[in-house]
Amino acid sequence: MFRHQSTTGRVVSQLLVVVLLLVLMLPLLLVVRESLKGEGWRNYVEVVADTPFVRFFLNSLVIAGSTVAVVTAVAMAAAYGMVVLRAAFGRTSQLAIVAGLALPGMALTVPLFVTVQRLGLFDSPIAVILPLSGLAVPFGVLVARNYLTGIPGEIHEAARLDGAGAWQLFARIVVPLARPIMAVIVIFTFLAAWNEYFLPLLFLQEHSAQVVTQIPGYFQSERHIDLPKVFAANLLISLPIVALYLVFQRQVRAGFLAGAIK
Amino acid sequence: MTTPSQLTRAADGPGPARARPAGEPARARRRHDRRARLAGFLWLLPALVLVVGVVHVGIVYNAVISTTDWNGIAPTRNPVGLDNYTAILSDDVFLAALRNTAVYAVAVTVLQLGAGLAVAVLVRTQARGRNLLRVLIFVPVVLSPAIIGTTARYLLDQDGALNGLLRAAGLGDLVRPWLADSSFALATLVVITVWQYTGYSFVIYDAAISQVDPATLEAAQIDGAGNLRMFTSVVLPHLRGAHLVLIVLTAISSLKTFDLVMLTTAGGPGTSTELLTLHIYEQTILRFHAGYGAALSLVLVAIALVFAVLQVRLSRLREV
């Protein structure tokens, strides 16, 4: 678009690109350098071998995986009920669900804490999965509903005339058509759950139950802070998510775009 | 003017005007419809139960607890009426948190939108490295704020790596404990946030700019418009929707910010980086003021509700 530039314009834009690349890379380079202080690469080995690092990882996978499954399933079902089956109380339900759209989890500290305490759910993944799901469902319902509204009604009508029941219509017609928006819900929910810090901070106190965002805290709770290991751990935690982004770049960006405007 | 897409959408919509299969008795059809609509309600019930159970019940519970002096643990609690709410008005930490949250949200929004738009323009020039920039700018967006927070806390320390670089570059005058200096801490948090999320505003602007009609651009070019002129009079007018979406979404995510601040400054020094979310956490969890924390939570709920309404309205516009 701005291919034909004056010499000044070309120099300025080239300079800006270089500065931006530096600003983006600099923290990474500093973290790598800091993480190698002391025992060098052994820091990485020790982080994985001498701490419950793998355990934290598996816990995060369980929590993020369950949250994604719950949110995608209930959001798709709800959108299907509202748009295609034109469910009774559809408008009211939609309003009630979408009202939670911008709510910070923090505003539920008191009720969540009391509930988890009463039910003895401390250190149980459910204490994190359920509130996370409840907070993620409004977004899922909003985007899924808007997406299904855009699918021509003739498609459902034709399937129904062919004798398809509600379940077949959902599984064979609606879900395959809605794959793009399901990908959006999966990406958003997974990132939100994987990166969540507040709910695990409140409810997961045993090391055996904790998740990846609590690993830096693990090194600080020891008598002294082992800085190189904090940096090494932070890099190791971030690698898989960055790798996933690089592999699914197009889908992730399309997901964020659709999430913003759908 | 009615566009073809609007016509089809109108025809697809629900309503009595919808064509029915001919030859079916109307009454049986209506009864069947009512039963189908009730069955449809079962499909949306799980989502409704989950959201009502977590969000609505939680908010009502907050409202009940907010009229007591409960500490969150003791078996007894005494009614105090609206005392917790009147206490909020004279709570200096709350007022500081409200001001900081607003300053943080506005600063992050302005800088993040500006930077995102600049990058969206830069990747359309001939500058080398533009494709690498396109990929790298989004990497921080997927990272956990908790990880960014702990990393920043040590990199930006008085003896941290950034100050080390500044000293080595002969810029020793700039050296300071970035997150522990009350006149720089909030600004430093703004910069960290903008660093992390500019990729997000870039993606939105990038999509909006790529929807600008190439023919219009070409015509402008033939008319002798320079790049600056082309940007201000052809591209910029197309970005109104993108600005709106980004302003609402950035404000919402600023309101939710907790991890980054908790793990870097924890609201300090003093109250210079105290945010609403941190204040609730401190009062409820660290000081056992559950009644007061519940009242603060309801204030946050009210603010969040305004933004939820804005986001839903924007999602209906369906344009960037």
Image (spheres, rainbow, N blue to C red):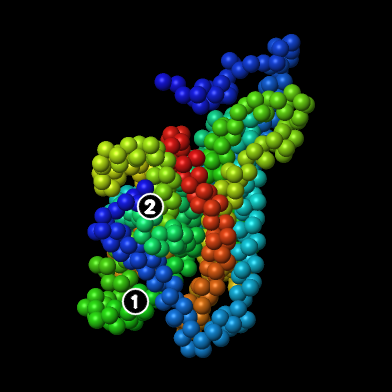
Residue at 39%, 47% in the rendered image: B205
- Return the residue found at the far right: A163
- Left/right placement of residue B259 relative to residue B225 reads right
Which three-letter amino acid code belongs to the residue tagged 2? Arg
Chain under numbered label 1: B
Residue B233 got which mark? Answer: none
- Return the residue found at the far bottom: A39
- Foreground residue among A221 and B211: B211
Residue at 39%, 72% in the rendered image: A26
Measured as percent of width and height from the top left, residue A218 is found at 53, 75
Is residue B165 in view from this perspective?
Answer: yes
Residue B124 got which mark? Answer: 2
Quadrant of the image containing the N terminus of chain B: top left
Residue at 46%, 36% in the rendered image: B318
Cα separation, mark 1 vs mark 2, equals 32 Å
- Foreground residue among A242 and A167: A242
